Image: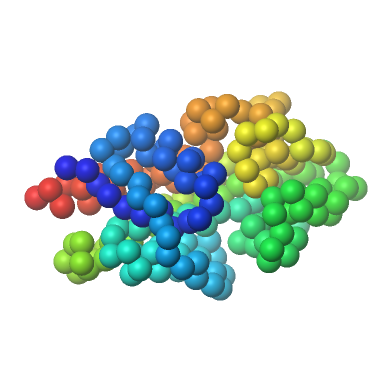
Amino acid sequence: MSLEFVLATHNAKKVREFQRLIGERMPQAVVLPYDGPEPVEDGLTFAENAFIKARTAAEHSGRIALADDSGIAVDVLGGAPGIFSARWAGESAGDEANVQLLLGQLADVRRPNRGAEFHCTIALVVPDSVLAGGHEFVAEGSWRGSLAYEPRGSHGFGYDPIFEPEGLEVTAAELQPAEKDARSHRARAFVELLPELERIAARLEG
């Protein structure tokens, strides 16, 4: 029996990354497209925002929903942009504007003070219509590194072109997708989530 769920995002690049992560680790799972509303993310933590999105998607679709909330935390900025990473340069700003603003804010900061960390929280929401009583779960993953002085690489999205993972001399955007999938904050959160997905699948089969 396959496990079907919606991924609460309209970000095509994030969908492809999740499809790779899930396909490699849980091939019986099916990621369905989500065409529902995007709620206001007014939570104060990654987990709160992830659950806002997952609950909205589960209610709209009547299916199991996954949602991630992720961002980059820069040491010298006290953990910012954090939950505001996707809109650091403004509500309608894109990846390039966000990256350029962050680089400008760190223009005078030299190594080794450019430390940063990617963080990902994945929320799982199973509605009562799928499993009696419903069910919720949260998984988290982090990826430590530092910020480059300028963007490099054509893979990935968001802040990947300026994030240099710890122990590597390349940015996340210079890694091949399979390499990133083996190391990233999202991959680490999904590894934590996987046993829960398998338990849900077993309960549905039973």
Residue 171, how many percent across, how many down? 68, 33
Q: Is residue 188 at all visible to an observer of this figure?
A: no
What is the count of numbered marks?
0
Quarter of the figure with residue 79: bottom right
Q: Residue furthest right?
A: 108
Residue 101, how many percent across, how many down? 80, 54
Q: Image quadrant for the N terminus?
A: top left
Q: Is residue 149 above or below residue 105?
A: above
Give the residue at x 35% y 58%: 65
Residue 7, how many percent across, how many down? 41, 53
> Along the line of sight, which residue is nearer the eye, 112 or 18?
18
Residue 188, how many percent across, how many down? 46, 41
Give the residue at x 35% y 50%: 32
Q: Is residue 172 above or below residue 39?
A: above
Q: Residue furthest front?
A: 35
Side (left or right) of 168 relative to 103: left
Give the residue at x 90% y 48%: 108
Q: Is residue 200 at all visible to an observer of this figure?
A: yes
Give the residue at x 57% y 41%: 143
The colour scheme used to paint the residues is: rainbow
Q: Residue furthest left?
A: 206
Q: Is residue 148 above or below residue 76?
A: above
> Along the line of sight, which residue is nearer the eye, 64 or 194?
64
> Along the line of sight, which residue is nearer the eye, 166 or 29?
29
Side (left or right) of 134 relative to 178: left
